[in-house]
Image: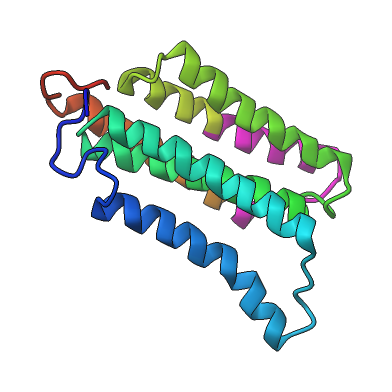
Amino acid sequence: MAGTTDNEGGRRGSPRRMAVWGAAALVLLLPLVAMQFTDEVAWDLADFAIFGAMLVGACGTYELAARATGNRAYRAAVGLALATAFILVWMNLAVGIIGNEENPANLMYGGVLAVGIIGAFIARFQPQGMERALVATAIAQALVAAIALVAGLGYTLVLTGFFVALWLTSARLFRQAAREPTHAGAAP
């Protein structure tokens, strides 16, 4: 496939691709299995549809990025950023981070994601710019916690630190990707 620089590239049965989609299918089945053993997990069809759509979006985006480059650090950075965004969205939908899932203050986390997405487009998905976009995303994440603290809305310092650390780790991986030589015909 054009733009692919490794042996497993965009092939239909590549181990990387099978691992990504297989893990997504397994994660989607976990709530179904949990429902067989506890009443604490009670998903309906809409929950599975939303979760499935989120998984398809995250895995599809990762696959596009993975096909565009043979740079392992870039792939890891994209994977970590997508996983972090996925967890942030899912936590907000499921239980909420500030208060419960119906607290409108949780909408501030949409701004965190907007910073990352807009930054990625401004950077044209190039590693140097992506590094800056992910640092800005980490700052936005911390800013949401600060606003929640000042407003007396309550927040979890540990959870905020967890997300900031993930965003910054992804930024560091993008920095590493920028230092790795790119192969002929590869994007980022």
Q: Position of residue 103 (x, y in %)?
A: 88, 46
Compared with 23, 61 (above or below) is above
Residue 149 is a magenta residue = yes
Quadrant into which the C terminus falls: top left
Residue situated in front as seen by the camera: 25 or 142: 25
Q: Position of residue 135 (x, y in %)?
A: 46, 29
Whether residue 160 is visible, yes or no, is no
Residue 90 is a magenta residue = no
Drawn side of residue 131 relative to residue 114, left or right: left
Drawn side of residue 109 relative to residue 69, left or right: right
Q: Which residues are magenta?
A: 138-159
Q: Residue at x 47, y 21 (%)?
A: 120
Compared with 115, 144 (above or below) is below
State the image quarter where residue 76 is shown.
top left
Drawn side of residue 183 relative to residue 122, left or right: left
Residue situated in front as seen by the camera: 39 or 155: 39
Furthest residue to the front?
Answer: 12
Q: Residue at x 74, y 85 (%)?
A: 38
